[in-house]
Amino acid sequence: MYRLLSSQDEALANTLHNDGWRGKPLKPVGVAGPRFLGAPRKKGVYSTSQDGSVWFGSPVPEIASVLVRALAGVEELVWGSVRLRVRGVALDMDGVLPAGDGPVELETVTPVVLKHEDRNLLPGDEHYLDRLQHNLAHKADVLGLPAPCGVRVLEAGPRQRFAVRGAPRIGARVRVVMEADGRFVNAIRSWGLGLDTIQGFGWVR
């Protein structure tokens, strides 16, 4: 992500990396790891195929425009030790909601990472909903939007563990319901739920 941003705006990439956004440590960007069509399912192996997609997003227009420019000119993405050839780029504007409160369901395709006192939390753990609500309210504050309320987990996937530069990231995919302003729902769809969204966690389907 930072490599993409730096290719078009190095100052923005450095500020986001070092300081966060507008005086807050949050980084309002999200990414979903590559998802490959027709890839065989193998236990303990992240299998691939010749066709797949990667999603990038940001609810902040200044950041999103830099991402669009960067992706428009990229021919290859380096994902860990894998090189992905880019065949095309498309804007995804499906399901944009108008302003106004209402119940909404959101489902993630990557695990949601949450912590309480440096302990990784999973759905059903004490403090899980409190920390998820806090994270959402913090994001709403950064964006100047009303915070959602009444967050509940409807369904959760299995525990998953990843290593990011040697550090563990533990979480689970979730389907949640909340009362939220449509503008915030649109924003979170291009940002994600929970922590470490810039590392590929909490991306909303």
Image (tube, grey):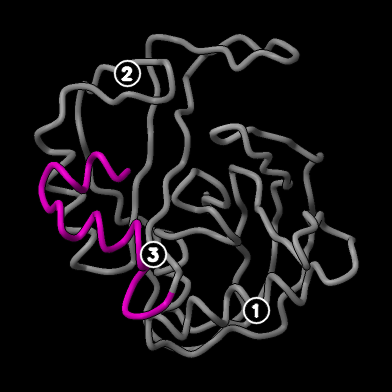
Is residue 16 a member of the stretch shown in magenta?
yes
x 45%, y 71%: residue:
25
Q: CA distance from mark 3 to mark 1?
A: 15 Å
Label 2 vs 3, first from the N-terminus: 3
Q: Is residue 204 left or right of residue 168?
A: left
The residue where tag 2 is placed is 84
Three-letter code, disc 2: Leu
Q: In the image, which residues are magenta?
A: 1-24
Residue 48 drawn above or below residue 31: above
Judge by depth and name the residue closer to the eye, 170 or 143. 170
Q: Is residue 116 left or right of residue 96?
A: right
Main structural element of the magenta stretch: helix, strand or loop? helix
Residue 163 drawn above or below residue 178: above
The residue where tag 3 is placed is 28
Judge by depth and name the residue closer to the eye, 43 or 15. 15
Judge by depth and name the residue closer to the eye, 26 or 165. 165
- Label placed on residue 134: 1
Three-letter code, disc 1: His
Label 3 vs 1, first from the N-terminus: 3
**Picture coordinates of residue 176, whole percent (x, y):** 70, 64
Mark 3: give few (<14), some (14-19) or many (20+) Cα within 10 Å: many
**Picture coordinates of residue 187, whole percent (x, y):** 40, 69
Q: Identify the secondary structure beneath mark 2.
A: strand
